[in-house]
Amino acid sequence: MQVLIDNFDRLLEAFLTTFRLFLVAGGLSLVFGTILAGMRVGPIDVLSKAAAFYVTVFRNTPLLVLLLLVVFGFPKLDINLGYFWMNILALTMYTSTFVCEALRSGVNSIPLGQAEAARSVGLGFTQTMQNVVLPQAFRAVVPPLASVLIALTKNTSLCSVFGMAEATALMKGLLNDNTSQLWWIFGGIALGYIVIVELISTVAGLLERHWRIA
Amino acid sequence: MAASVLFDAPGPKTKARHRVYTVISSIILLAILAGIIWQLERKGQFAYALWEPFVTPDIMQLILEALGKTLQSAVLAIIGALVFGVIFGAGKLSDHRLLRWPSWVVVEFFRAVPLLMLIVATWFYIGPEQGAKGFTALVVGLILYNGAVFAEIFRAGINAVPKGQSEAAYAIGMRKSMVMRIILIPQAVKIMLPALISQAIVALKDTSLGYAVLATGLTYTAKEIFRTFNNTIQTAFVIAVIYIVLNLILSMIATWAQKRFVGEQKIDLPLVGGLVQSQPMGTGTTGAP
């Protein structure tokens, strides 16, 4: 217990780094994943195939290997943005594939009849999208997107191996110095992660309620 | 005719426009690809010396052994996780609060905590040495995390069996354990199988975390190789290809299992509606052959 109190400021700082990694990589993944999903479901065959290829390759590569490639490999190609942004780059490359798949399955979950019915009552393309397709897609997409973001939170722990002083790195450091306090340290750091995960699922729950059928 | 909710079937003008977009996007994609290759070439990353280790018999042997170790850790972890998952999944389904609550806490905890944290903490618990200790820590961590996920899959699978099945079983006088063993589990396994295989893919990918605790396996061997030959990009590429091939094989098995077992249930008429509808993604598959 004492270890946690003594190192409270370090703990806070470490979780701030974890949270920053999550926020930045999450935001970028949402943007890039949406672009990928747009390419994937769009009518242009080449773009759809390219996005599918990207998703297949990066979804099946372990994140650790991807981090290895980006953080240790890219500097050899004169691509170096510093540890934080290199970690972000790898996390984004990986997570955006899952965002893409979540969005795509959300769009695919809407029965074709919905769009056909909307068109047959005379709604235009924009109206169909705005009033019929997208509201349903948002609703269908919230739970899988939340689980992608929760996975991202947990995946930021891998950055501890690649030079980020975030929560898991701190746990390793504390364990090195205070092996006898293993349970307290483990419990304390775990609690921090659980708080972030709970935060995401609470927000997701609220959004789901917000978008549910009245 | 339209194959998507997003747009109508294209007419002649749209088709012409799409052709233009196709050309433009092809050029952009090719330019990106060419840029990557050019940058790799410019930095001498295609030099034979950097790739040579992967055609050297000794090192190929080393990678093969490491692959064996990685597969071994994955198999051990999945078997352990299945046991863990069945125990805690059944615990979560229990009628007794004393069993249900602890199971719920355990499953939720291990699902919410990062796997790497579990592995590192286990490693420090059993003594942070490289090799066998790291390997044990990796497998234990994988069992705890994937076991918790399996428990959820198990519970969802059992719940996905139509209620009438267990009601009918109780009505003809079966006991709780018999209903579970003879009626629910055999049907639930079919529903669970695709999800179980997907999670096995995740477990296989996560064996790469052995890197952090110096566990013998693909990623640790990769570290030794790129430390020796200074060829990080090439090593990462080779390891990634190995993982991708393994995962794609497992994905194909998952797809096959989905088709095989969903197809089988379709013949079994009284079950089909209930089973397909109670699966979360059921609507998408009903029309498929």
Image (cartoon, rainbow, N blue to C red):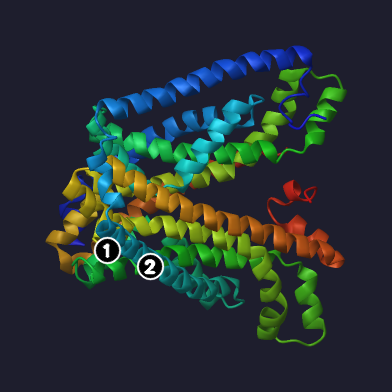
Residue lying at 30% horizontally and 51% vertically, measured from the top left: B55
Marked residue nearer the N-terminal end (1 or 2): 2
How many marks are shown on the rendered structure? Answer: 2
Residue A166: in sight, yes or no? no
Mark 1 vs 2: CB contact within 8 A: yes
- Residue named by callout 2: B73
**Between B100 and A142, the one nearer to me in the picture:** A142
Q: Is residue A75 above or below residue B177?
A: above
- Residue named by callout 1: B215
Q: Is residue B71 above or below residue A130?
A: below
Q: Amino acid at mark 1?
A: Ala
The spot of residue A58 in percent (x, y) is: 45, 41
**Between A204 and B71, the one nearer to me in the picture:** B71
The spot of residue A4 in percent (x, y) is: 21, 56
Residue lying at 59% horizontally and 68% vertically, measured from the top left: B154
Q: Chain letter for mark 1, please.
A: B
Q: Amino acid at mark 2?
A: Ser
